[in-house]
Image (tube, helix red, strand yellow):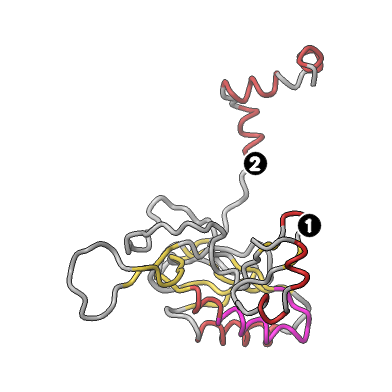
């Protein structure tokens, strides 16, 4: 670890020779390395090797992530669930940003690349453990919204940007808006369900834990708790 004085005297070419880290002054702590890659990777440093697995099928009726939440147009997977690499998703991200940049549009991502993919070289004998880490990936189930865009652009601009992004990704995609139905399978779509007010439901039929939480808000109890 270089000291503060050694860091100032060191030549610039020797400090910035590594493209994967950008060192900068951090007070008394010396040099702090900042990750200089895309954000399609988790923040933790220890990589846990995982099984290949498969994209789960939602059999319990969950529709979480199957409709728009932030934007006015979105790109949703229509075909069978698939595993997509971080590089593929990053290329689609670049295409969308390039199309909506002139109109100051906003892009929202709805996925996390947290699947560590490990590979072994060709013509390698079986056994001797799992291969080395190769890249990050994300499991995308059927009906999952990957990208959302928002802004003052024309409808044709939005659909063209999402169409070009879909060409960079494996699988079959569809472009949706606020009025689109929620996809629950490859062939079926349903209307958006009405939002559920869980607070009113608990007030009408409170559980023991909920009743205790409401009772704890009484001023008399708060006075003797010191809160």
Q: Are marks 1 and 2 in contact (CB under 8 Å)?
A: no
Circle 1 Cα neighbour tier, 10 Å, few/some/many (<14 / 14–19 / ≥20): few
Point out the stretch of residues depicted in magenta: 91-106
Residue at 61% x, 51% y: name it. 194
Residue 224 position within the rendered picture, expressed as x and y whole percent measured from the top left = 78, 12
Residue at 75% x, 22% y: name it. 217
Residue 144 position within the rendered picture, expressed as x and y whole percent measured from the top left = 50, 66
Q: CA distance from mark 1 to mark 2?
A: 49 Å
The residue where tag 1 is placed is 27
The residue where tag 2 is placed is 197
- Residue 25 magenta-highlighted: no
In the shown orientation, is residue 82 left or right of residue 12? left
- In front of the other: label 1 or label 2? 1
Q: Nearer the viewer, residue 24 or 42?
A: 24
Residue at 57% x, 54% y: name it. 193
Q: Main secondary structure of the magenta part?
A: helix
């Amino acid at each position: 670890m270089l000291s503060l004085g050694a860091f100032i005297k060191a030549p610039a070419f020797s400090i910035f020779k590594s493209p994967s880290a950008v060192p900068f002054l951090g007070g008394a702590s010396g040099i702090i390395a900042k990750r200089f890659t895309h954000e399609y990777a988790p923040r933790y440093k220890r990589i846990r090797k995982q099984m290949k697995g498969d994209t789960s099928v939602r059999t319990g009726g969950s529709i979480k992530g199957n409709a728009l939440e932030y934007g006015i147009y979105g790109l949703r997977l229509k075909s069978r669930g698939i595993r997509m690499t971080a590089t593929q998703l990053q290329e689609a991200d670049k295409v969308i940003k390039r199309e909506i940049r002139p109109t100051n549009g906003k892009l929202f991502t709805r996925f996390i690349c947290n699947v560590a993919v490990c590979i072994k070289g060709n013509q390698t004998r079986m056994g001797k453990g799992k291969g080395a880490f190769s890249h990050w990936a994300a499991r995308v189930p059927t009906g999952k919204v990957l990208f959302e865009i928002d802004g003052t652009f024309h409808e044709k601009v939005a659909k063209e940007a999402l169409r070009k992004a879909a060409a960079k990704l494996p699988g079959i995609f569809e472009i949706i808006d606020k009025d689109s139905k929620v996809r629950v399978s490859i062939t079926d779509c349903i209307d958006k369900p009405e939002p559920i007010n869980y607070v009113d439901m608990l007030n009408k039929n409170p559980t023991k834990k909920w009743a205790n939480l409401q009772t704890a808000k009484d001023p008399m109890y708060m006075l003797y708790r010191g809160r």
